[in-house]
C-alpha cells in the first residue's frame, strides 16, 4: 500500500530531476572554467593592451592609438636592463640565503638530536605572521646607516665614522628578504626531511661513512631535487615581493621589478607614465612566468627523484655531540632576529614621545600616547573595518572557490580539468603589483563603458586577492582531497545525495582541517599583502591596514607606525596560533 | 508721508527678509566650538570675532542643508593627520550632525593624481581634494572642479588666495623653513638667507641637510621672488643647492624631514612646515625651526569635484573650513594657519616669531599654474643627476 501513496507525477519527476542534475553536472565545470579564465585572462589582456597604448591616460585608451613606444621608453630611458640585473641578484641571493637557513633549521629539527626542537619547530612558522612591511621597517630602525639603533650605538661606542651595516644595500635587501622566506621554506622542507628513507643513510654508515659525511653525500644529494623545486617556488615569492625592496631599496634608487613598476605610477605631481608602467610590468610578468614554467616542469617530473615511499619509518637522527648547544643557540638566534627583534623595535618606537635612539632617558619617558592617538582616530577604525571585511570576504571566497576547483580537478573526468589546474596556478606567477596595475586598467575601462564604480571599491580588493591567493588554496585543497577515498562519495551518490549534500556531509567534515587551514592562511595573506592594495586602494572606502602603514611610514609618522604595527603583529600572531591549532592537522606542513 | 511706491518697496523688503529668514539656516557659534577654542588656547577676543562672523559666514541656504542630509558620506582626501581630524571633526559635526565625513590622510599619487584619473574615467573616488597644487594644471585642463564662489565664507579668503573662476580656494597658510636638531646645530650655523645656505662655505654643506623631493613647497616661492627669479634659480641657486650644499636627497615625505634629525639621520631637514614642526616641538623634542629669507609661504588649496554625489554637503563642509570658526578650530586642533583675511594677526600661526617681520615669498596661483612645470623641468634632472630617489 505504501507504493499507492506515491503520486504518478512524482514518479515521473524522478528521471526529470536526474536529467536536470546531469545537465547541471555537465555544464557546471565549464561555467567554472570560463569564469576562472575570465578572472585571470581579462586583467592580463588589459595589462598588455595598456602597454601598447599611446594615450596619455588609461581612460583615453583606443585601439586606434597603439604602438611600441612604451617598450622602447622602458628599455632605453628607464634602463630596465639594470632592473633585470638587480632583480636577478636580489632573487638569487635571497633564495639561496633563505633556503640554506630553512634547510639548516629543518635538518636540525628533523634529523638531529638538538635539544629544544619542539620550540624551534613551533617558533619558526610564526615568522609567517610578521608582515613584510613591518619586518623591513624594523630593519631600517635597526640598521639604517646613520640613525639605525645598532649602527648609532656602534658609532657612539667605538667612535667609528662608518656604520657597522648598511641595510640600504643589495646585501641588506637579500638579508631581509632571505629571512622572510625562511618560515614557508621551513614548512615545506620539514616533511621532505621527515619522509626520507633512512636505509640509504644507514647503508652509507655501514660502509664506514661518518654521520656528517653521510649527511653531506647521501642526505643532501637525496634532498636536492625537492630543495630545487622549493627554491624555485621561493624565488617566485621573492620576485613578486614589494614590501622589502620598497622600504629598503626605493630610498636609494635600488630598484627591482616590483618597485620600478610602482615607482612609474606613483608620481606626486604630474600624471604618471601609465603605458610605460604596463610595459615594464610585461617584462616582469614574462620573467615570473618563465620561472613558474620551470617550477611546474620540475614538480611534474619529481616522481623520477622520489625518495618518499609508502613505508612507515622513523628517520635516523644525527648526533651533534658538542655542537648540540651551539645549534640550539643558532636556532634561537634566528627566532630572536626574525620574530622577537621586530616586535621589540616596533614596541620601543610605539612607546616613545618622539623618535630617539635607545637610552635610559628614552625608556623613562615611555608613554601610551601613540596608542591613545591611534585609537581616537576615525581613520583607524574605518581602516580596521575595511581590513576585516576584505579579509573575511577574501578568505571565505577563496576557500569556497578553491574547494569547487579542486573538486573538479581531482574528482571528475571533466575534459578541461588540466586547463583549470593551469589557470588556477597561473596567478601565483602574477606579482601583486602587476595584478594591481592590470586590474587598475581593467576597472578604468569597465567604469568608463558601464558607468559602474568598480575602481576604488572594497570589492576591487576582494577580487584582486581572490585571484592572487587561489593558487595556494587550490594546491592545498587538491592534496587534501586526494586523500579522501572516493568510496565514501560513491556511496553517497548511490544513495541519491545531490552534490551539495555530498560536499556538506562528506567533504566538509573530512576536509575541515584543510578548509580551516586555507581560510586562516588566506586571511593572513590578505592582511600582510600590500602591493595590490597600494594600487587599488582609494581612500576611505577601501583603504586597508597595510596601505595605511605604508602611507604613515612614507609621511614619516614613525611612532604611529610602531603603535599600529604592534597591534597588527599581535593579531597576526593570534591567527598564526589558530593556524597551528586548527589548520592542516594531520598534514603537518608542506601543504602550502 | 510715504508714497504707495515706498509702501510697496517696504512690503517687498519685509517679504524678502522673511523669505530669506525662511530659506537660510541661522548660525551662531556652537557651544562645542566655543569650548574647544577656549580649551585649546584661542583668546577670547578671537573667539568673539569668529562668533560674530558666523551669522554671515555660516549662513548657508536651508535647501543646501536639506539636500545634504539626504546625501551620503563625503570622501575627503586630506593632508591633515588622522589625529588632527579626530580633534576637529566632532566640532564640525556638532554644528552639522547630518553630514558624515570620511577623511583619509593621503600622500603621493593617491592624494591628487589618482582621484583625477578616476574623474577622467567618469567616476569619483574622492569628493573633496586638498593640496593638489602639484597637479593644478592637470585639474584645470580637465575642468574637474566645481565652482564654490557662492559659499557664504568665500569672500573671507583674500583674492590672491582663491581662484578667479571660483573653483578652488586657499584653505590654510603654511610656512616652509628649516628644522634642525638643537644638539647638533649651533645658532651661528643657521643661514640668514637661502643664498647663505647654498654658499660654497656653508657650514651645513656635505650631507648635514636632508632634503625631500618637494620642489613645489619652497623653491617655487623663490622662483617667483624678485630677488631670485627663474633665470637665477636655474643657473645659480639650484645648481649651488645640489653641488655646494650636497644635501642628502631623501625619499621620505615632510614628516620624515621632521623626525629624522632627532635620531641623527641628518642635522637639518628641508622643507618643513611650521604647524607640524611646532607640534613635534611640543613633545619636548630638541628641535629648532629657522627661516632664511625670503620666507616661503603658501596656502594649501581645497576644491570639490564636479558631479559629486555629495554636492551640497561638500559645499557646506568647505564653507565651514573657510569660515573663521572652521579656520580657528583647525588652528587649535593642529596648528593649521588660517588663510582668512581677518585672521592674519599675530598668534594665529604656530612658530609665528620665526618669520614675523621677515620678507615673505608667497607662492602664487600664477606660479602654480604657469611656473611650476618650468621649475620641474629644471629641478627634476638636477635631482636625478645628484642621485635622488626617483
Image: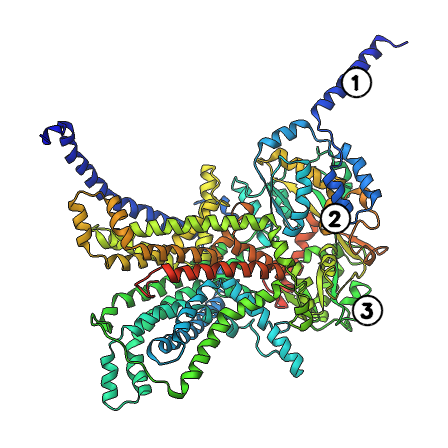
Does dot 1 land on a helix, a strand or a loop?
helix
Dot 3, crowdedness within 10 Å: few (<14), some or many (≥20)?
A: few
Does dot 3 land on a helix, a strand or a loop?
helix
Name the front one of labels 2 and 3.
2
Position of the N terminus of chain A by quadrant: top left
Query: Which residue: 64% across, 68% down?
Result: B386
Query: Which residue: 25% across, 91% down?
Result: A208
Depth order, front residue of A580/A286: A580
Chain letter of disc 3 in the image? B
Chain letter of disc 2 in the image? B
Could you tell me how far apart the alpha carbons at marks 2 and 3 are, in whole angstroms? 29 Å
Q: Is residue A301 left or right of residue A375?
A: left
Does dot 2 land on a helix, a strand or a loop?
helix
- Is the residue under label 3 in contact with that under label 1 (CB below 8 Å)? no
Position of the C terminus of chain A by quadrant: bottom left
Depth order, front residue of A244/B224: A244
**Residue B237, position in %: x, y?**
74, 64
Quarter of the figure with residue A426: bottom left
Q: Name the residue beneath numbered marker 2.
A: B331
Quarter of the figure with residue A521: bottom left
Q: Earlier in the sequence, mark 1 or mark 3?
A: 1
Q: Name the mark on residue B187.
A: 3
**Residue A162 visible in the snapshot:** no
Q: Name the mark on residue B13.
A: 1
**Residue B323, position in %: x, y?**
74, 39
Amino acid at each position: 500500500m505504501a507504493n499507492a501513496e506515491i503520486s504518478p507525477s512524482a514518479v515521473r519527476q524522478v528521471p526529470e530531476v536526474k536529467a536536470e542534475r546531469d545537465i547541471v553536472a555537465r555544464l557546471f565545470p565549464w561555467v567554472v572554467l570560463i569564469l576562472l579564465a575570465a578572472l585571470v585572462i581579462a586583467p592580463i589582456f588589459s595589462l598588455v593592451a595598456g602597454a601598447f597604448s599611446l594615450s596619455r591616460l588609461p581612460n583615453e585608451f583606443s585601439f586606434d592609438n597603439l604602438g611600441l613606444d612604451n617598450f622602447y621608453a622602458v628599455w632605453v630611458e628607464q634602463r630596465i636592463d639594470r632592473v633585470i640585473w638587480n632583480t636577478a641578484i636580489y632573487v638569487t641571493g635571497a633564495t639561496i640565503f633563505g633556503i640554506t637557513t630553512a634547510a639548516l633549521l629543518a635538518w636540525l629539527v628533523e634529523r638531529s638530536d638538538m635539544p629544544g626542537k619542539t620550540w624551534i619547530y613551533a617558533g619558526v612558522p610564526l615568522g609567517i605572521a610578521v608582515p613584510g612591511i613591518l619586518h623591513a621597517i624594523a630593519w631600517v630602525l635597526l640598521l639604517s646607516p646613520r640613525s639605525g639603533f645598532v649602527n648609532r650605538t656602534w658609532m657612539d661606542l667605538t667612535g667609528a665614522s662608518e656604520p657597522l651595516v648598511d641595510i640600504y644595500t643589495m646585501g641588506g635587501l637579500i638579508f631581509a628578504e632571505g629571512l622572510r622566506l625562511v618560515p614557508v621554506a621551513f614548512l615545506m622542507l620539514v616533511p621532505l626531511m621527515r619522509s626520507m628513507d633512512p636505509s640509504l643513510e644507514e647503508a652509507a654508515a655501514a660502509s664506514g661513512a661518518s654521520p656528517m659525511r653521510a649527511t653531506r653525500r647521501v642526505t643532501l644529494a637525496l634532498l636536492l631535487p625537492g630543495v630545487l623545486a622549493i627554491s624555485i617556488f621561493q624565488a617566485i615569492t621573492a620576485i613578486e615581493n614589494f614590501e622589502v625592496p620598497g622600504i629598503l631599496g626605493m630610498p636609494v634608487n635600488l630598484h627591482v621589478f616590483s618597485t620600478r613598476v610602482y615607482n612609474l605610477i606613483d608620481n606626486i605631481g604630474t600624471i604618471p607614465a601609465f603605458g610605460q608602467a604596463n610595459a615594464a610590468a610585461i617584462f616582469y610578468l614574462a620573467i615570473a612566468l618563465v620561472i613558474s614554467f620551470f617550477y611546474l616542469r620540475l614538480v611534474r617530473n619529481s616522481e623520477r627523484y622520489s625518495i618518499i615511499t609508502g613505508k612507515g619509518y622513523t628517520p635516523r637522527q644525527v648526533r651533534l655531540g658538542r655542537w648540540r648547544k651551539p645549534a640550539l643557540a643558532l636556532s634561537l638566534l634566528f627566532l630572536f632576529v626574525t620574530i622577537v627583534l621586530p616586535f621589540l623595535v616596533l614596541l620601543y618606537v610605539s612607546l616613545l614621545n618622539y623618535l630617539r635612539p635607545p637610552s635610559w632617558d628614552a625608556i623613562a619617558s615611555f608613554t601610551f600616547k601613540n596608542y591613545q592617538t591611534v585609537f581616537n582616530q576615525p581613520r583607524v577604525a574605518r581602516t580596521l573595518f575595511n581590513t576585516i571585511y576584505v579579509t573575511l570576504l577574501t578568505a571565505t571566497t577563496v576557500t569556497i572557490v578553491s574547494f569547487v576547483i579542486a573538486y573538479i580537478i581531482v574528482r571528475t573526468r571533466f575534459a578541461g580539468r588540466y586547463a583549470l589546474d593551469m589557470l588556477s596556478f597561473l596567478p601565483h606567477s602574477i606579482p601583486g603589483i602587476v595584478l594591481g596595475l592590470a586590474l587598475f586598467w581593467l576597472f578604468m575601462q569597465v567604469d568608463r563603458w558601464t558607468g559602474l564604480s568598480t575602481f576604488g571599491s572594497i570589492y576591487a580588493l576582494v577580487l584582486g586577492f581572490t585571484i592572487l591567493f587561489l593558487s595556494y588554496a587550490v594546491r592545498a585543497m587538491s592534496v587534501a582531497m586526494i586523500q579522501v577515498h572516493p568510496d565514501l562519495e560513491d556511496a553517497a551518490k548511490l544513495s541519491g545525495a545531490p552534490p551539495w549534500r555530498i560536499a556538506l556531509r562528506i567533504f566538509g567534515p573530512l576536509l575541515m582541517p584543510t578548509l580551516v587551514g586555507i581560510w586562516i592562511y588566506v586571511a593572513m595573506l590578505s592582511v600582510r599583502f600590500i602591493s595590490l592594495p597600494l594600487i587599488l586602494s582609494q581612500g576611505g572606502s577601501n583603504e586597508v591596514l597595510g596601505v595605511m602603514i605604508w602611507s604613515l611610514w612614507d609621511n614619516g609618522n614613525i611612532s604611529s607606525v610602531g603603535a599600529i604595527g604592534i597591534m597588527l603583529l599581535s593579531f597576526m600572531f593570534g591567527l598564526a596560533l589558530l593556524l597551528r591549532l586548527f589548520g592542516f592537522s594531520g598534514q603537518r606542513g608542506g601543504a602550502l | 508721508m510715504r508714497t504707495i511706491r515706498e509702501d510697496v518697496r517696504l512690503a517687498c523688503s519685509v517679504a524678502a527678509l522673511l523669505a530669506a529668514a525662511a530659506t537660510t539656516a541661522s548660525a551662531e557659534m556652537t557651544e562645542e566650538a566655543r569650548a574647544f577654542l577656549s580649551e585649546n588656547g584661542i583668546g577670547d577676543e578671537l573667539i568673539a570675532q569668529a562668533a560674530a562672523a558666523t551669522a554671515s559666514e555660516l549662513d548657508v541656504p536651508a535647501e543646501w542643508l536639506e539636500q545634504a542630509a539626504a546625501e551620503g558620506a563625503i570622501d575627503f582626501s586630506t593632508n591633515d593627520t588622522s589625529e588632527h581630524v579626530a580633534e576637529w571633526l566632532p566640532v564640525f559635526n556638532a554644528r552639522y550632525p547630518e553630514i558624515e565625513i570620511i577623511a583619509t590622510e593621503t600622500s603621493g599619487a593617491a592624494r591628487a593624481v589618482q582621484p583625477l584619473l578616476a574623474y577622467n574615467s567618469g567616476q569619483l573616488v574622492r569628493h573633496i581634494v586638498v593640496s593638489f597644487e602639484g597637479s593644478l594644471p592637470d585639474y584645470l585642463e580637465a575642468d574637474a572642479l566645481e565652482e564654490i564662489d557662492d559659499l557664504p565664507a568665500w569672500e573671507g579668503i583674500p583674492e590672491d588666495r582663491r581662484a578667479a573662476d571660483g573653483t578652488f580656494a586657499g584653505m590654510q597658510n603654511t610656512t616652509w623653513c628649516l628644522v634642525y636638531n638643537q644638539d647638533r646645530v649651533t645658532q651661528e650655523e643657521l643661514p640668514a638667507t637661502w643664498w647663505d645656505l647654498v654658499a660654497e662655505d656653508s657650514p651645513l654643506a656635505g650631507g648635514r641637510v636632508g632634503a625631500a623631493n618637494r620642489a613645489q613647497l619652497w623653491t617655487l616661492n623663490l622662483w617667483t621672488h624678485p630677488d631670485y627669479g627663474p633665470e637665477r634659480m636655474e643657473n645659480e641657486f639650484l645648481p649651488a643647492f645640489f653641488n655646494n650644499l650636497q644635501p642628502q636627497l631623501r625619499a621620505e615625505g615632510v614628516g620624515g624631514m621632521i623626525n629624522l634629525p632627532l635620531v641623527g639621520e641628518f642635522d637639518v631637514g628641508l622643507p618643513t612646515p611650521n604647524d607640524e614642526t611646532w607640534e613635534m616641538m611640543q613633545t619636548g623634542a630638541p628641535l629648532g625651526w629657522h627661516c632664511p629669507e625670503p620666507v616661503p609661504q603658501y596656502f594649501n588649496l581645497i576644491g570639490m569635484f564636479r558631479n559629486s554625489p555629495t554636492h551640497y554637503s561638500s559645499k557646506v563642509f568647505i564653507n565651514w573650513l573657510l569660515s573663521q570658526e572652521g579656520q580657528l578650530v583647525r588652528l587649535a586642533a593642529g596648528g593649521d594657519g588660517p588663510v582668512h583675511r581677518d585672521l592674519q594677526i599675530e598668534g594665529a600661526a604656530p612658530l609665528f616669531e620665526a618669520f614675523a617681520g621677515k620678507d615673505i615669498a608667497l607662492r602664487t596661483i600664477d606660479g602654480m599654474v604657469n611656473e611650476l612645470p618650468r621649475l620641474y623641468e629644471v629641478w627634476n634632472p638636477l635631482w636625478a643627476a645628484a642621485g635622488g630617489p626617483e
